[in-house]
Structure formats: C-alpha cells, structure tokens
Image (cartoon, rainbow, N blue to C red):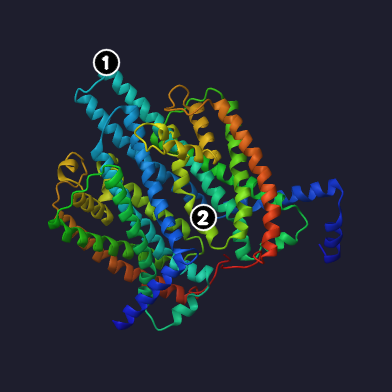
Amino acid sequence: MSGATATRASRRSDFRFKLGLNVRAVFGRAYPRVVGANREPSWIFFEVFLPLLGIAAYVFIYQAFYGAQVAQINAGHCSAAGCAADLVGAGQVLNALVATVVLGGTMVAFWLNVLWSMASQLYWEKEIGNLQIYMMAPMSRMALLAGMAVGGMFMTSVRALSTLVAGVVVFGVIFAVANPFMLLAVFLVTLVALYGMGMMFASLYLLWGREAWNMSALLEEPIFFSSGMYFPVKGLFLPGAAPWGPLVAYAGAIVPAMLGLDALRQLTLPGTAPLPLMSPTLELELLLVLAVVFLILARFTLAYLEKLAKREGKLTSRHQ
Amino acid sequence: MNSFWRTFKVAAWLGWEMDSNWTEPWLFVIYSIIKPIAAAFILVLMYVVFAAIGNIQAPQLFAFMYVGNAFFIFVGSVLFGTFQVIQSDREWYQTIRYVYISPISYYVYIMGRAFSKILVSAFAVLITLGFGAGFLGVPMAMTWANVPVFLAALVLGLFCLLAIGITLGGVTFLMARHTQTLAEAVPGIFYVFCGVLYPLSILPAGLQDVGKAIPLTYWFDLSRRLLLPQALMASVPTGLGGFSDLTILAFLAISSAVFFGLSLGVFKLGEYLARKAGKIDMTTSY
C-alpha cells in the first residue's frame, strides 16, 4: 500500500471498512501463531515433551504415596470395609489424582502461553522494534491483542491436546465424560477468561521494562500453587494445610485457571473427582463473569496505558 | 591464574547486576524467595491432599521430597545461568563480540556469570530448608562429623552442574536463538530421573538405570542422607542403599571430573566450529 493510499485508508470511518480492517488484523496477528509456530518442528517436539516431563514428576510423587498406602494396607492396616475394598479405593484415588496432574499440566501450558506470549508480548514487540509499527497501523489495538489470543489459544490447544493424549497413554488415566457440551463450554469460557486476563496484562506490561520478564517468571509457581494445578484446590481448605490456605484459594480464584480446572476435573471424573470446590455450573457462571470483566478491563487499560506510555516516553524505549 | 580470578570476579559482579538491578534489593530478595517457596508448597499440598484422602501418613516420603526439591533449586538456576550467557550476549545484548575479543578466558567468564545465580539460589535453598524445618516439621539432623562430607558433596555437585551447563552452553554456540527449550528440557529430565522428589525405585526398571547414570542423582541422595535422620530414611527404598556415603562421594567426584573434561572439550569444539562458520556473533533475528 502506498503512503497516500494508507493515509486515505486510515481516515475512512465507515463501519464495514473498520470491521474488515480489524478482522484482517486479527487473522494477520494470529497467522504467525497458527502457521508460523509450526514451521520449526523442534519447537513442537519440546512444547509437547517438556510439559510431559513436569507431569511425569508429579505423577510419580502420587505413585510413591500410593505405594506407601498399599504397603500399609498389605501390612493389615485396613478400614472396616476390608483390605480388598481399601485397595480398590486407593487405586481410584490414585487415578483421580494422576488425572488431576494431567489436566493441570495441560492448563499449565495455557497459563504459560498467557504469560509469555500474551502478557509479555507487547513488551517483546517493543524490544524488537515492532511496537511502533503496530501503533502507527490504523487497526484497533484490541484487534491486535485478539489476534494474539486467538493464535495463542489455537497453538497451545494443539500442544495441550498432544500432552493430554500422551499423558493418558503413558500413565493410563481413565477419564469419563458425562456431559461433553458442558465440558466444552467450561473449556472455552476458561480460555476466553484466561486470554482476557492476558490481554489486560499485556497493556500493563507495556509500561514496564525488564520488570515484565521477571513478573512473568514470578507468576509461574505461585499461580500453579494457588490455582491447584497439581492437586485439588480444595486441599487449601483442609485442616492439614496452613491456616492461610483459604486466603490463597480466594486470591487464586482471580486467575480463571483455578475455577476452570476444578470444573474440568469434576466433568471428566464424575463421582470420583477428589475434593470438588463447588458445582461446575456455578464455576461456569463465575468464569463467564471473569471473562467479561477481563475483556472490559483489557479495553480500558490498553487505552489508558498506551496514553501513559506515550506521555512518559516509554513506548519505544528498549533494554530498560 | 590472576587473570582467571579477575575475569571470574568481574563476570560474577556483572551477572549479579544483570540479575538484580531491575528492582530494589528488598524486592529482589522477595522475588528470589517466593518462587521456590511456592514450588515447595505445591509438594506440601500434594502430600496433605493424599494424606487426607488416602488416610495415610508417610513423613519419610515427605521429608525425602521436600529436601530433594530444595536442592533442585540449584539445578534450574545454575543450568539456566550457564546456558543463557552465550545466547543473551549474542542475540539480546549483542555484546558477545566485545567480550569475546577481550583478553580473557570466555569459559571462566561464563562460570563467573553463573556464580551470581549460585549465590541467589543458595539463599533460596537455605530459606526453603529453614522453612521446612521450622514450620513443616521436616526433621533435619546433620551431625558435625558429617559437615565436611556434606560440604564436599555440595562443592562437587555445584561444580558438576556448572560443567554440565558449560557443556550444553558450548552447544549453544552453534544453535539459533531457541536454546530456551534446551535450558528447560535438561533440568526437566534431571527432575524426573534423578530421584529428586521420589525414590528411584518408583521409576520403571529401565528408567532407574538412566537415573543412576546421572551424577546429580548421587548428589541428591548423599545430601538427603546427611541432612535427614538415618532412622527416617532407612525405610525409603532409594535404590542406592548398598553404597556407603564415601562411595557415593567418590562417584560424584569422578563424574564431576569427567564432566569437567567433557565441558572443556565440547566448549572448545563448539567455539572452534562457530568461529569457522562465522557464527560467534551471528544474530538470528531475536
């Protein structure tokens, strides 16, 4: 597009043109994540293989505990139901907890994508010099963020699904889906809420320099913990946990992964999901609220912080 | 020797500044503590949940897992600290050409850069262990007689980690910008196979042998033996029970020497090939 044509295009204000422009921007920004990210086969291998390592470690922990439990049962420490029933029960608990880890491992993939490919993205774009080009382009910044989110969701879903399948095959987890539509609804709304949060963070990170990288690093393990990625989050309410466990759980509920994961766990392990937090329907409703709130907040923070970044001269400053 | 020491000192200072000067010192301290403590809490909750649902108590497994996890803090940060030096200097800061042509040993420079990470992670390990002993009832019981062996194992373990890191760092001379995956994959493999969180005997038979071939397995085992009460650890089938403390220390010493030799060889080879191909300061579009 020549300079004169670009100027004319940027001044057009009819709805159809703007809609087309923004839809093209969404597709354009999603393209590198849907197509480009699959051009390097080693990335796909590592993105499937690496989460599997983390999952394996946590699965083996539960298997070690299970081994101790079986040894205890075999030594004659059985409940009133009898040793055989205890062994069956122990096997069911192990399956449910291993399933928890496998589901949590896939959710971790989405959370890491939100942190490193959504929240940090505008910061990275600033560092490599793309941000000023985006800012000069005539499309809405929200279309840019939406494109990043759509591409990120697709890319991570493919990898998370591979991890899930590998986890099921390797560890022999048995899932039983009773309500597939509800499951799909919870999954999609969780993703929208998560990526909405990522869009909001992306704006916040715009103001930061190297703190952005460190902030993303800081939001890994603490969020894995508070969202119950590898254990049922209601464990935070157990008497054996710290007295401040419930506070961590309430704070963790801000990150949609927690409610989404708990609902997914209940929907894929009907009747056997250990320590459910609340009903999946209620969790879906809360996730819908979170999704709407985060998308609205993303819209406002982006506009405000873009203005602030321009005023403070931080929009193009690198390595600070 | 004087030149090596000076390089090491300055590189360590540079590494420290790069790691910490993005924020206030007190915030950096909190940042350095929160991540490992949160990781430890994940394990605590896994144990609490299993103990509640399964109605069992396995304090020996909890202590085993907690101490192993605390020492693993070293692995992630030291390996990442050595891996990322070449890539960040080449791709990100684009300063590798200036450092590389200066009259210093680049190998020592990388060790120095990683040293600041060792210091920060040592602090995090101490906090995690102290927290476990003070608030979670992890029984630490190291005798004075065991302190020299423990320190020797610590030094050898860290040296071995540095050597593994530089070996892989030598490979990054020839890799494009996506070395991050390697930096995450290698600690991930150690996490699964080295008996960090569970006894080696939990792994399938073939995989136990993989663990036994990695020197860090011996470091973790020895550290736990020396830190935790013998009576508690006696019931944990580690798969290394047949070896005495000194035998394990000897394994660690030999494997550290082997990895040091390997790191020198791979580093020199990677450097030679990168120079020959003109890749020392070639950026790959960050």
The residue located at (66%, 43%) in the rendering is A295
User: Could you give the CA–CA distance between mark 1 and mark 2, rounded to whole angstroms?
Assistant: 51 Å
Q: Amino acid at mark 2?
A: Met
Query: Residue A94 versus residue A275: which sits nearer the camera?
Result: A275
Residue B286 visible here:
yes
Which residue is under mark 1?
A: A80
Along the horizontal axis of the image, is A36 left or right of B80?
A: right
Is residue A140 shown above or below B50? below
Residue at x 36% of width, y 71% of height: B112
**Could you tell me which residue is drawn at 41 percent across and 45 percent down?**
A54
Protein chain holding label 2: A
Closer to the camera, B277 or A5? A5
Task: List x then y, in percent, for residue A70.
Answer: 26, 28
Q: Where residue A24 appears, x then y in whole percent? A: 75, 50
Residue A34 can be seen, yes or no: no
A83 vs B217: above or below: above
> Relative to the observer, which residue lies in front, B109 or B118?
B118
Q: Amino acid at mark 1?
A: Ala
Q: Chain of mark 1?
A: A
The quadrant of the picture occupied by the C terminus of chain B is bottom right
Front: mark 1 or 2: 2
Of the two numbered discs 1 and 2 on the same chain, state the one appearing first in sequence.
1
Q: Position of residue B84 (x, y in %)?
A: 44, 64
Neighbour tally class for label 1: few under 14, some 14-19, many 20 plus, Cα within 10 Å? few
Judged left or right of residue B229, residue A102 is: right
Q: Secondary structure at mark 1?
A: loop
Q: At x 35% / y 70%, what residue is drawn?
A: B111
Residue A215 is labelled as 2
